[in-house]
Image: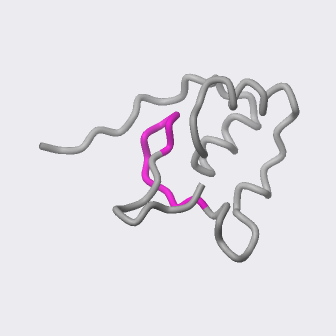
Amino acid sequence: MSTPVDGPDRCPRCGSAFACGAAAPGPCPCSTVTLDAALRARLRARFDGCLCLDCLRALAQGAPLAGPAPETAAH
């Protein structure tokens, strides 16, 4: 997933803004997180797109898929 022209990506788990590095010339920082095959399958089934590095790290350490409440924009 590449960073859209209109702004940063949004993590579907926590709602935070982040820059996905999958389309970047170098390796994406998420490639440093090891997720087992079962967890990767559950993530693909539940979420569309990439998750932020903080969520991936938390999930790798056993955090629940639901995650923290998404961030909301101030009105």
Quadrant of residue 51 in the image?
Answer: top right
Residues in magenta, as a range: 11-20
Residue 65 versus residue 26: which sits nearer the camera?
A: 26
Residue projecting furthest to the left = 75
- Which quadrant is the N terminus positioned in? bottom right
Residue shown at 60% from the left, 47% from the top: 54
> Is 32 on the left-hand or right-hand side of 5?
right
Please determine whether, in this image, residue 15 is positioned above or below residue 21.
Answer: above
Q: Position of residue 57 (x, y in %)?
A: 69, 44
Residue 3 versus residue 28: which sits nearer the camera?
A: 3
Residue 30 versus residue 2: which sits nearer the camera?
A: 2
> Is 15 on the left-hand or right-hand side of 36?
left
Q: Where is residue 67 in the image (x, y as percent from the top left)?
A: 54, 28
Residue projecting furthest to the bottom = 25
Residue shown at 44% from the left, 61% from the top: 4
* Numbered label tally: 0
Q: Is residue 57 magenta?
A: no
> Is 12 on the left-hand or right-hand side of 24?
left
Main secondary structure along the magenta-highlighted residues: loop
> Is 47 on the left-hand or right-hand side of 3?
right
Please determine whether, in this image, residue 71 is positioned above or below residue 46.
Answer: below
Quadrant of residue 47 in the image?
Answer: top right
Residue projecting furthest to the right = 37
The colouring scheme, among rainbow, by chain, secondary structure or one colour, is one colour
- Which quadrant is the C terminus positioned in? top left
Q: Position of residue 28 (x, y in %)?
A: 70, 63
Q: Position of residue 32 (x, y in %)?
A: 79, 57
Residue shown at 76% from the left, 37% from the top: 60
